[in-house]
Amino acid sequence: GAGVSQSPSNKVTEKGKDVELRCDPISGHTALYWYRQSLGQGLEFLIYFQGNSAPDKSGLPSDRFSAERTGGSVSTLTIQRTQQEDSAVYLCASRPNRGGAGNTIYFGEGSWLTVV
Amino acid sequence: GENVEQHPSTLSVQEGDSAVIKCTYSDSASNYFPWYKQELGKRPQLIIDIRSNVGEKKDQRIAVTLNKTAKHFSLHITETQPEDSAVYFCAAPRGSGTYKYIFGTGTRLKVLA
């Protein structure tokens, strides 16, 4: 695709329910990131996938959060037993390759999650 | 540590004036420093970046400077325009050879017409 695609764009869920957020990275990008942005706040790192390496999960806020990346492409972020403080925009980003001193990461439009 | 500190959190300037946003990082192995602009309700987008082997980079009205000794880098916007109003984020990788980008807390820039 032309860019990073995320779905759903908006999700309202009841407290205690599980939610899944999906990310389709740019074709050929080997790295994929999830960030969380609460209203008016910064970009909080959640998890980072690079190729077939073990993901860096150091930013996941609790064991209710998990993420998978199947076949090195699509990723799903799962939040179990959602709480109101989980309400935020969940941004996915992808990056072309590992080489070089740095590569641009490209963000999706985000999934707006509201827990009521 | 992995912190990237960003200042100020908000900045208001008159149209035509300059704006400067500063970031400091803690990991001396970091070697790539991008700046992102996020307009209201939209995704963050890269506006300029700098690598550790240069001290300054310019692109029209925007420039970034890097001081590796002091571990800080700055975004400079000259001749500001209303469309520059947005939230700006700096970022740094956790270290050389890794691409775990940690973002600053953001600066909300308002350009007053």
Image (cartoon, rainbow, N blue to C red):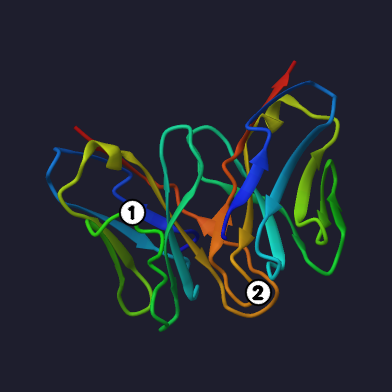
Quarter occupied by the N terminus of chain B? bottom right
Q: Is residue A27 visible?
A: no
Looking at the picture, does residue B21 appear above or below residue A45? above
Give the numbered dot on residue A61. 1
Q: Residue at x 48, y 32 (%)?
A: A40
The amino acid at mark 1 is Pro
Whether residue A93 sits left or right of residue B13 in the image: it is: left
Point out the residue furthest to the bottom here. Answer: A52
Number of marks present in the image shown:
2
Give the numbered dot on residue B29. none
Q: Position of residue A101 (x, y in %)?
A: 70, 73
The amino acid at mark 2 is Ser
Task: Measure how far apart labels 2 and 1 are at the Cα level.
Answer: 25 Å
- Residue closer to the observer: A62 or B14: A62
Q: Position of residue B71 (x, y in %)?
A: 76, 57
Quadrant hosting residue A39: top left
For the residue labelled by badge 2, is the local secondary structure a helix, a strand or a loop? loop
Give the numbered dot on residue B96. 2
Q: Is residue B71 visible?
A: yes
Looking at the picture, does residue B46 appear above or below residue B93? above
Q: Residue at x 86, y 64 (%)?
A: B54
Q: Position of residue A58 (x, y in %)?
A: 40, 64
Quarter occupied by the C terminus of chain B? top right
Mark 1 belongs to which subunit?
A
Mark 2 belongs to which subunit?
B
